[in-house]
Every structure is written in C-alpha cells, then in structure tokens.
Image (cartoon, grey):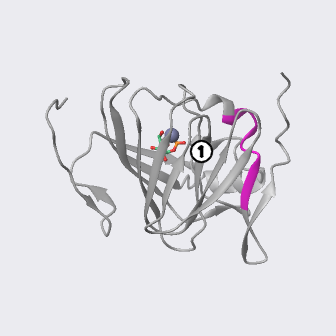
Amino acid sequence: MKQHPFTFSISVPDETLSEYDNHIVRRLSAMVGQYQDAQAFTAMLSQDPVLYEVYEIKRPESEGELMNGISIVHPGKVGEEYFMTKGHFHTVLDTAEVYYCLKGEGMMVMETPEGEWSIEELHPGCVLYVPPRWAHRSVNTGQLVNLVTFFIYPGNAGHDYGTIEQQGFRKLVVERDGRVQVIDNPRWHPKER
Ligand code: S6P
Ligand code: ZN
C-alpha cells in the first residue's frame, strides 16, 4: 500500500482507471429479491447480465483515509425497473460520500434510517454530495450508455447491504409510458422502533 502521494488517471472514453486494486463485477444473480417483477427477473437469470462494475483504489479501512474509484452501471431494465446498484448504508453511519458524474444519465436514490428520502438526477459534470446517514443507490436511466461516476468516501465507512436487502429503498425508478418515473416501493414499510 502506497504511503506516498500518487496520481492516477481516469479515462472517460474507456471507462477505466490507469491503475486500480479491485474490479468488482455484479450480475443480476446478486440482486435476488431487489426487483419487483419476479417473472422478468427469473426470465433474465439464464443470461445473468452484468448490471454494474466498480474499479477501486483500495486504501486502509481507517479514519483519515479516502477510498475512491469509478462505478459503471450498464443500461437495461428488469421489467419496468432500470439496472441499478445494490445500494447500501455505510456501516459507520456518520460518513458521507461524493459522486462526480462522468458519463451517462441516471439518478441517485437515497434515504435515511428514519425514512426521509431524496432522489437526485445525475448527468455529466454533476457533483452529488451524499451526507452522513443517507443510504445510496445509483440507477442508470439511459437507453444505451453506461452511467459512469467517480466516488470518494472515508476509508472507515464500510458497507451495510443487509438493511436495504430487507425491503429495498422507499422509492423505485421505473420506465412507464416511455418516461422515467419515481414510484413508491410497495414492499417498503416504516420500521417499527
Ligand atoms: C461505496 C460507493 C460506491 C458503490 C458502488 C456500487 O461506498 O458508494 O463505490 O460501492 O457504486 O454500489 P454498491 O451498492 O453495490 O456498493
Ligand atoms: Zn457508499
């Protein structure tokens, strides 16, 4: 692990980093239970398409460090729902994240543990600040082009996928009547406390 300043470059046309430590590839089969249309999901499983990829520069998982890399969500839909990331809270809830959109069109779906929600559009040049406590999921609403974002977040943040896996996000991004629409997730209910 480098302990000296270093540079790397991002190729937007090639959608890659000049150097990286991990290349994560997530296929449809990693998203069991996350899409509403179970029939469409099952029908697509035989091909098991790649939904998204992450190239990351790994840093020590400690306070003071910053993890960074690029996330690439491919275009496509399962039923009426667009391809999207699993989405997560940071395990250390009080950690933020910044996304910089490099290519494509999409949305970031976000919510807090209390059920507050927000959806921001992503387009090239747009910077999104995700405050501490907000779970986040990127959705590619484009027809043909990958949604490519640069991300940076604290080294000690960690990923809590389990909470979102239970019932998904409060809002879903779907294509209806040829338009991008945000609808309520029928599976989502306020948590008892
Ligand atoms: C990590 C950051 C991104 C995501 C990536 C994939 O905190 O938010 O690097 O990991 O967009 O999403 P997910 O939900 O599968 O980690
Ligand atoms: Zn994150």
| Residue at image point 72% right, 44% down | 169
Q: Quadrant of residue 183?
A: bottom right
Q: Quadrant of residue 88?
A: top right
Q: Secondary structure at mark 1?
A: strand
Above or below, 178 relative to 116: below
- Residue reaching furthest to the bottom: 178
Q: Any magenta on residue 100?
A: no
Residue 53: image location, x then y, percent = 43, 50
Q: Amino acid at mark 1?
A: His
| Residue at image point 15% right, 39% down | 5
Magenta range:
164-173
Q: Is mark 1 within 8 Å of ligand 2?
A: yes
Residue 13: image location, x then y, percent = 31, 70
Categorize mark 1 by other alpha carbons within 10 Å: few (<14), some (14-19), many (20+): many
Residue 21: image location, x then y, percent = 27, 39
Quarter the N terminus occupies: top left
Q: Any magenta on residue 171?
A: yes
List the residue tagged with mark 1.
136
Between 16 and 5, the one lying in front of the other is 5
